Image (cartoon, rainbow, N blue to C red):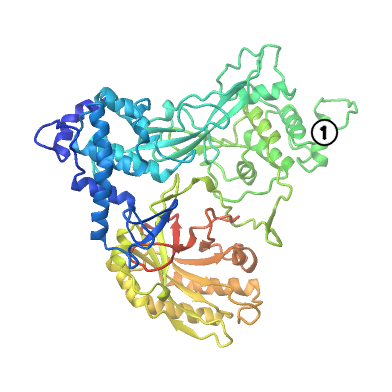
Amino acid sequence: MKRFASLLLACILICSLAPAAYAAPTEWEVSDEGVEFIKRFEGFSKTPYLDNGTWRIGYGSAIKKEDYPNGITESAATKLFRKDLAVTAGKVNAYLGQYEIELEQCQFDALVSFTYNLGGSWMNPNYKFSSYLIDGLENYDDLTILDGFVVWCHVGKNVDHGIAERRLAEAMLLIYGDYEGDTAPAYTYAVLNGNGGKVDSDIICFEVGESLDRLPVATREDHVLSGWYKSNGKAVKGGETIEEPMELTAKWFLDVNLPFTDVPNGAWYYGYVGELYQDGVVNGMTPTTFEPSGKVNYGQALKLILLATGLEPSDEEMAGHWAQRYEDLAIEAGVVAEGEMGLNDVITRGQIAKIASKAMGLDDASGKSPFHDTDDAYVMALYNAGIVEGTTEKDGKTYFYPDDSITRAEISTIIWRILNHNEDTNSGKIQYASYTLNVLKDVDKYTRNDDNYYDKNGYKHYLGEDTWVGIDVSIHQGNIDWKKVARDGVDYAIIRVGGRGYGDEGIMYGDTNFEKNIEGALEAGLDVGVYYFSQAITVAEAREEAEYVLEQIEGYDITYPVVFDWERIGGSEARTYGLETDLLCKIANTFCGMIEEAGYTPMIYFNSYCGYVKYDLSKINRYDFWFARYNDTPGFYYDFDMWQYSDTGSVSGIKGNVDLNISFKNYAEE
């Protein structure tokens, strides 16, 4: 797709140009549009901060620690920033002059943004992007330019998603003259982990909606590439498209020289069959044929599954069917019932799921089924253990096809995964501090990939899901400039209505900044929710707290949850000390039930201690959860809808620290 050459003329109209289409390349200055473009990525800090040993302020300007003891205004910061950009512009101009490169204003602005963030290391003519500039960008298609440009997005050896997004925006300015990100085609990228193999680049760009078929072929000595796998463990399939950033990992099989003429090299099941054949687990139907599409009968399935799970029958010879001893063992172990089916009967995928999950002792069937055609507990247990995946069809839905017969290729895949399954030695238990807790069967398990969290502009986001940036505030944040908060990328605010004291009397109080905060947030265009800090010890007190909250929020546009925030405060002197779990759950349900009845969305807030020890989450899980843990990753066994990940956040318009949150739901649209 050679868009670039045809767009050069259009770029003349889009960019802020000198009268001639191509001006002398050594005298460029950053345009006002360019300054504002770069500002958006640098962000503004009123007070000094330490960055890799250098004190900075404003839009990243280097200063001495003692400079600006009272902070800096945005106008003063802009003056400093323009001086810094002038220095960077000089470096870019020198590079352009050295290689006689002619550019447009918008392209110069993009290169200054690039260099201000990265430094001048990219200017080496041996690097791809630099060589493209020297040769003339019009000689390359968009994706080639993007791949050479966006690769400059690493922190250490790892791709930084925030920097990658900046590179994409700079590339849209470079190629299309798009300062605002609203006129160029939409592009995204995939981060590639070779997993022991070699790949030309660990990041590759795509147009949104484009097929992933152009993924590179990774190589590894003595191994065969199984394929590229997504963070959820699913393989990338032919024709699958990309809509947003993805992280993909190469998976490998040993390169086995199979004698079977009907198992072609490159078949999706080749590696599974190869390793099982090498280990003597499976054989062909003849010396030269495997019959991968052949059906599997009950006796064959029993033998393979029992042996894979370590259940071996005695060597005693038995009269009758060769698989009878495997069925007898399976009956004794409680894997199957007597007379369940004939040993020569063709077995279905659903029956395989039941036998395999029972033989493996799997009992985690939690979570919503990913399959359009079944939510069977045995299938879900195998899915949660990573043994089965299903098939995604052209309609975008994933099917398990439980009533279909299973093929020899498919059962080989299942047996390989059983043999390679990492068994949990403490299955069904959660270890939290000194507590060993039973897994709650009716509570959804946390399934997100912790590696997918990334920071952008000071806030956490999650690769592969839409998320929303939030803060929660009370009188402790003082006077807040809500318009600055909104401009700083915050989507929603959870505002304290009031609370109850933890002393014997348990006196209720209102947050004296509540009215000012909620009106300021709404006026600034933020979505708003509220929370009440509870120390209730009776159901009657929970009703009293809910009534108070409903009275205070009447007339306000509350689009985010109304939160019950019960916390463990103090020691044995606290009125809540020793409150029993059953009573606490009743208290939470009472509060949330009244909120729900009034037409709002209720939510329950807790940290690890309350989530694991004080609450029984299975008794309150009809309501959404807001989990608090100040860490790079949540580290909590169960799922939640909102995560409070920091209590030391910095947001423009708020003095001092503020709690930061990531929401996996846009409650304003629900």
The quadrant holding residue 340 is top right
Question: How many numbered dots are placed on residues in this image?
Answer: 1
In the image, is residue 537 above or below residue 5? below
Residue type at numbered disc 1: Glu
Residue where numbered disc 1 is placed? 312
Task: Tell me if 298 is positioned left or right of 386 in this view.
Answer: right
Regarding residue 293, the answer to whether it shows in the image is: no
Which is more toward the observer, 15 or 317? 15
Residue at figure coordinates x 53%, y 62% from the top left = 628
Which is more toward the observer, 567 or 619? 567
Where residue 211 appears, as percent x and y from the top left, is: 40, 30
Task: Tell me if 508 is positioned left or right of 442 in this view.
Answer: left
Within-10-Å neighbours for mark 1: few <14, some 14–19, many 20+: some
In the image, is residue 658 above or below residue 515? above
- The quadrant in which the N terminus is found is top left
Task: Tell me if 314 is positioned left or right of 365 in this view.
Answer: right
Where residue 447 appears, as percent x and y from the top left, is: 55, 49
The quadrant holding residue 26 is top left
The quadrant holding residue 569 is bottom right
Residue at the limit of the structure toward the left, as seen here: 19
Where residue 182 appears, as percent x and y from the top left, is: 25, 44
Task: Tell me if 31 is positioned left or right of 206 in this view.
Answer: left
